[in-house]
Image (cartoon, grey):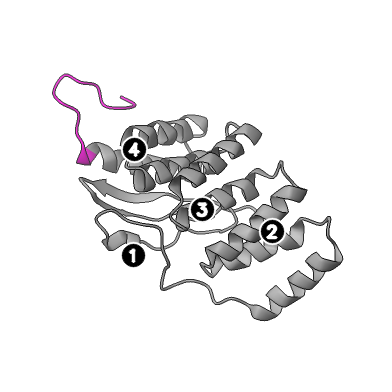
Amino acid sequence: MKTESIAYGIAGVAFGLIAGWIIGTQQAAPRPPATPQAAAAAPAPGGSPRAAVLDEAKVTALKSVAEREPSNAQPRVELANLYFDAERYDDAIKWYQDALKLSPADVNVSTDLGVSYYYTNQADKALLQLGRSLEIDPKHAKTLLNIGIVKAFGKQDLEGATKAWQQVVELNPDSPEAQAAKRALDTLRSAHPAPAGEQKPGG
């Protein structure tokens, strides 16, 4: 697992037929679209057949470190990441929350917590947490990308999603996050073309 990782976004939006994926900031590559979301008309967060197998030995070792070092956020972050990768999001939430208590300015942990809320069908809570991430870093591209995904998938707020993805593109057009946002925007515009004479978003 890479230390610096990328959250990718959406594969498609078309009149209620949505195919996409979302991952946390600690992961290095997007999940494949072969998930329950890809087949659902209104996708709900859920598991993937390619979830990582939980390394119980590593979990035990990290829990031991966390117990010995109550002021150390890192083992808690690593535990949360392990549970996230295994798609055990309730466990991930617990450890991300513990880590944030010790390191409240860690924007990546905050964003991963928001993503975990989304995957436990708590879209509103996810958006609140992602909003806290923006309070830490208003230009955090991974957070903005994920806000767009949660708004599109969890809230069916396509206008809000469009605004978030446009911000990602404006921040750094050549970044991986911006490329994912561009794909999302292009698909959204194809699915919902503007009426004649009306400017498309971002046009």
Report the side of 163 relative to 14 (left or right): right
Of the numbered discs in the image, which one, if any, rests on residue 36?
Answer: 1
**Which residue is located at x 39 percent, y 63 percent?**
32
**Which residue is located at x 60 percent, y 39 percent?**
133
Name the quarter where the C terminus is drawn: top left
Q: Which residue is mark 2?
A: 77
**Which residue is located at x 27 percent, y 59 percent?**
40
Neighbor class of circle 4 (other Cα within 10 Å; few <14, some 14-19, many 20+) is: some
Neighbor class of circle 3 (other Cα within 10 Å; few <14, some 14-19, many 20+) is: many
Mark 4 lies on a secondary structure that is: loop
Magenta range: 190-203
Report the side of 29 relative to 41 (left or right): right
- Foreground residue among 165 and 43: 43
Give the mark toward the camera: 3 or 2. 3
- Furthest toward the right, the residue is 68
Q: Which residue is mark 3?
A: 117
Mark 2 lies on a secondary structure that is: helix
Of the numbered discs in the image, which one, if any, rests on residue 157?
Answer: 4
First in residue order: circle 3 vs circle 2? 2
Find out whether residue 31 is within the magenta segment: no
Total marks drawn?
Answer: 4
First in residue order: circle 2 vs circle 1? 1
- Residue 97 location, x and y as percent? 66, 53
Q: CA distance from mark 2 to mark 1?
A: 27 Å
Three-letter amino acid code at the position of disc 1: Pro
User: Label 1 near label 3: C-beta < 8 Å?
Assistant: no
